[in-house]
Image (cartoon, rainbow, N blue to C red):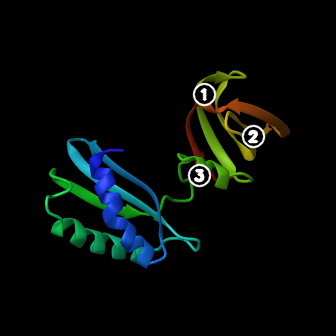
Amino acid sequence: MSKVIENVTKAVTPILEENNFSLYDIEFVQEKGSWYLRIYIDKDTGISIDDCALVSDQLSEVLDEMDPDPIPEAYYLEVSSPGAERPLKKEEDFKNAVGEYIHVSLYQKLNNQKVFEGTLINLTDDELTLDCNIKGQKKQFVIQRDLISKARLAIEF
């Protein structure tokens, strides 16, 4: 974990705990020459714009008061919900997604395709099982977890 993310995690945790929010993820990335500090927060009933503003305001104050400055680069602070199609990154994310409809992208083809969408019906340390609807027919696919490049929740249409 980078030092920036480590310092920001320490700074934001008390704010989140005080407001009964959970930390979903933190990113500190450079895009098109600018740095972005993105904090993704969540709670059981969902995150509102007011929740994001509250955390942003309080975290900005805390970060501005820290000495030495935990982020020496100029950056944009963004606080948001991870969204309905939130990425599945940590083991806990995958466990919470069992029974949910997900989108999985692979590094290489499996059964002649690199993208799968379906209901996550089983999860082990090494693989996951998706129940997919392929042209009106239900099919199950067992996917080795080390083949997965990205996974996220998906909205089923």
The mark nearer the N terminus, 1 or 2, is 2
- Identify the residue at image location x=75%, y=40%: 130
- At label 2, the amino acid type is Leu
Residue named by callout 3: 93
The mark nearer the N terminus, 3 or 2, is 3
Q: Secondary structure at mark 2?
A: strand
- Identify the residue at image location x=54%, y=47%: 90
How many neighbours does mark 3 have within 10 angstroms: few (below 14), some (14-19), or many (20 or more)?
A: some
| Numbered label tally | 3
Q: CA distance from mark 1 to mark 3?
A: 17 Å
**Residue 30 placement (x, y as % from top left):** 26, 43
Q: CA distance from mark 3 to mark 2?
A: 16 Å
- At label 1, the amino acid type is Leu
Q: Does residue 152 appear anywhere in the picture?
A: yes
**Residue 146 placement (x, y as % from top left):** 60, 29
Q: Is residue 156 above or below residue 145?
A: below
How many neighbours does mark 2 have within 10 angstroms: few (below 14), some (14-19), or many (20 or more)?
A: many
How many neighbours does mark 1 have within 10 angstroms: few (below 14), some (14-19), or many (20 or more)?
A: some
- Identify the residue at image location x=42%, y=71%: 16
Q: Secondary structure at mark 1?
A: helix
**Residue 126 placement (x, y as % from top left):** 67, 33
Query: Mark 3 near mark 2, Cβ–Cβ under 8 Å?
Result: no
Q: Nearer the viewer, residue 78 or 146?
A: 146
Residue named by callout 1: 147
In the rendered structure, find residue 130 and report the number of the disc placed on it: 2
Figure quadrant of the N terminus: top left
- Identify the residue at image location x=62%, y=38%: 104
Q: Nearer the viewer, residue 48 or 72?
A: 72
